[in-house]
Image (cartoon, grey):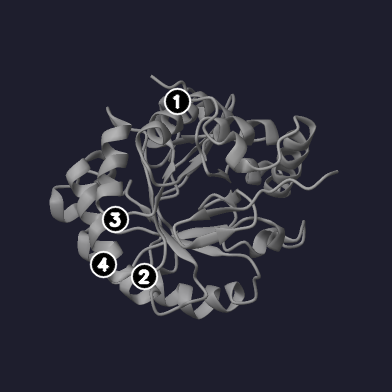
Amino acid sequence: MSEVDLSLEIGKLCLKNPVITASGTCGTGNELRKYFDINRLGAITVKGITPEPSEGNQLPRIAETSSGILNAIGLENPGLKGFLDKDLPVIRKYRVPVLVNISGYSLDDFAFLAEKLNNYKEISGIELNVSCPNIAGGGLAFGTDSEQVYKVSKKVKSNYDRPVIVKLSPNVSDIVEIARAAEEGGADSVSLINTLLGMAIDIEKEKPFLGNVFGGLSGPAIKPVALRMVYQVASSLTIPVIGMGGILTGSDALEFILAGASAVAVGTANLVDPRAAYRVLQELEKCMHDKGYKGLNEIRGKAIIKE
């Protein structure tokens, strides 16, 4: 197979290829190491952390759907100290960029995590999960309010000197407005989409299946929505877009790139096939080779219709 240039840049972050693991689907990446060499990927995004440890939501937390899953994990994590004590030593051994997903319930939470993580150069960048409720601001999720997205992006960027990625919620009326707020706040990139809000009913017990009642829908079911939103955002912003949502194959990844994504994240597929991210990378490279493409710059956004 002839050489295909899969390299790209997200802010100051240089990736050798566009395939990233999505936060929350492979822990710290260590869980995948016995299945393939994770250093072959473009980057690893580890499970989200909050300033203090969190036990997450009550059980059950996951419900399978016809073409995906509903999850209501609830940000279960060891907190910043637990992450630094137990997970960072593992991450230090990697030869692949590591992104840390951070969550909080106030602007100060995000600012605190950004400031602390800025001291650890082995972390290549941070991804802001703005889908959590802003308790200090009345409980509305940060990611549904463009002003809040702007504020949290600006606050974190002022406390962190490496790439800042804002992960966008699809549960909004205008995804472009929200994405533009992140860009104006100084974000180096946006990643989308996070899960769609859904639920399942237990017909035997005649009540909601999930302990949290509602959960986030991910997997192949949301791919058309994710593609549409990536297309809209990539058409409107100048910063790189990381596309995610239902990517199972190299062809899926190629669709997101044609829609304007600079990189792609593989999430739910990892729960079914631990080799999914690496397989997607291999299939993407073969697909591009077979179509005669030489590099990502040649095809990124090629499907976008210019007005």
In the picture of the structure, the residue carrying the numbered disc 4 is: 158
Q: Residues within 10 Å of mark 3 (few under 14, many from 20)?
A: many
As measured in the structure, the alpha-carbon distance from the residue carrying label 3 to the one carrying label 2 is 11 Å
Q: Residues within 10 Å of mark 1 (few under 14, many from 20)?
A: few
Task: Give the position of the N terminus as an image quadrant.
Answer: top right
Give me the disc on residue 186.
Answer: 3
Amino acid type of the residue tagged 3 in the rendering: Gly
Sequence-first tag of 3 and 4? 4
SS for dot 4: helix
Amino acid type of the residue tagged 4 in the rendering: Ser
As measured in the structure, the alpha-carbon distance from the residue carrying label 3 to the one carrying label 4 is 9 Å
In the picture of the structure, the residue carrying the numbered disc 1 is: 228
Q: Residues within 10 Å of mark 2 (few under 14, many from 20)?
A: some
In the picture of the structure, the residue carrying the numbered disc 2 is: 161
Residue 306 shows in this picture: yes
As measured in the structure, the alpha-carbon distance from the residue carrying label 4 to the one carrying label 2 is 8 Å
